[in-house]
Image (cartoon, grey):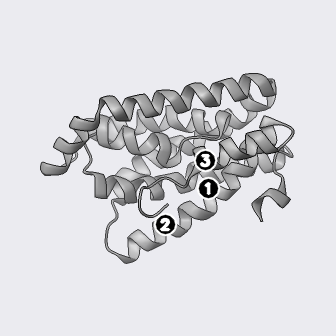
């Protein structure tokens, strides 16, 4: 989590989708797992002096609001639809990273000075990412890191830390919503 800004959500979600009887349980359990790792990784980056709370909050707070809506939306969808959605979102994120690889390298060599449009784009992206996170259990670093690096041009090292910080509000909102909906398998967290 600390190294890549991703809490392994996509790996945990894939494993839990295969092992738990329902995609709703896999999503809710993954969100709890990811929240714990995200907080741990964010603390490590903060101690190391690599944090951008301005970018993290610009993305994370709007994401928290829509993550709640996503959790309730997921409750209305059949397990099969959720599983297909997870696969589509995962494939899209991987494709975006492969296509944007050169752009990510360029972002690391230029100074990062965010302006008003950067913060507005961060908030807009946060709204969309939060909805995906609450609905499909993915988001956090897996989608947020490519968004920060490719769309907002945040250098990778700063983006990794910002991803972890930004993930905390949206993961907490989505995880609590899924917990209240009964979509968490505590035994799978151990």
Q: Is residue 85 above or below residue 108?
A: above
Specify whether residue 112 is in view.
Answer: no
Specify whether residue 135 is in view.
Answer: yes
User: In this figure, which residue is indicated by the disc labeled 1?
Assistant: 34
Would residue 110 appear left or right of 44 to someone viewing this image?
Answer: left
Cβ atoms under marks 1 and 2 closer than 8 Å = no
Q: Say which of 174 and 144 sits in front.
A: 144
Q: Secondary structure at mark 2?
A: helix
Position of the C terminus by quadrant: bottom right
Label 3 and label 2: CA atoms lie apart by 17 Å
Rendered residue at 54%/69% (across/down)? 40
Quadrant of the image occupied by residue 89: top right
User: In this figure, which residue is indicated by the disc labeled 3?
Assistant: 11
* Number of other residues with Cα within 10 Å of mark 2, as a class: few under 14, some 14 to 19, many 20 or more: many
Q: Secondary structure at mark 3?
A: helix
* Number of other residues with Cα within 10 Å of mark 1, as a class: few under 14, some 14 to 19, many 20 or more: many
Rendered residue at 29%/32% (across/down)? 100
User: In this figure, which residue is indicated by the disc labeled 2?
Assistant: 41
* Number of other residues with Cα within 10 Å of mark 3, as a class: few under 14, some 14 to 19, many 20 or more: few
Q: Say which of 140 and 10 sits in front.
A: 10
Q: Say which of 101 and 183 sits in front.
A: 101
Label 3 and label 1: CA atoms lie apart by 11 Å
Q: Position of residue 171 (x, y in %)?
A: 61, 51
Q: Secondary structure at mark 1?
A: helix
Would residue 165 appear left or right of 122 to someone viewing this image?
Answer: right
């Amino acid at each position: 989590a600390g190294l890549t800004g991703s809490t392994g959500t996509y790996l945990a979600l894939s494993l839990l989708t295969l092992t738990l009887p329902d995609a709703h349980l896999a999503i809710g359990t993954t969100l709890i797992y990811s929240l714990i790792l995200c907080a741990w990784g964010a603390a490590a980056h903060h101690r190391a002096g690599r944090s951008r709370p301005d970018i993290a909050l610009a993305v994370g707070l709007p994401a928290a609001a829509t993550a709640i809506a996503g959790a309730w939306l997921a409750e209305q969808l059949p397990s099969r639809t959720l599983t297909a959605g997870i696969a589509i979102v995962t494939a899209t994120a991987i494709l975006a990273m492969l296509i944007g690889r050169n752009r990510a390298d360029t972002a690391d060599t230029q100074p990062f000075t965010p302006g008003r449009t950067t913060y507005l784009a961060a908030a807009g992206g946060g709204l969309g990412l939060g909805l995906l996170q609450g609905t499909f259990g993915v988001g956090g670093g897996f989608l947020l890191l490519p968004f920060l690096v490719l769309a907002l041009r945040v250098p990778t090292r700063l983006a990794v830390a910002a991803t972890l910080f930004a993930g905390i509000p949206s993961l907490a909102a989505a995880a609590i919503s899924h917990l209240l909906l009964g979509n968490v398998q505590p035994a799978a967290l151990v």
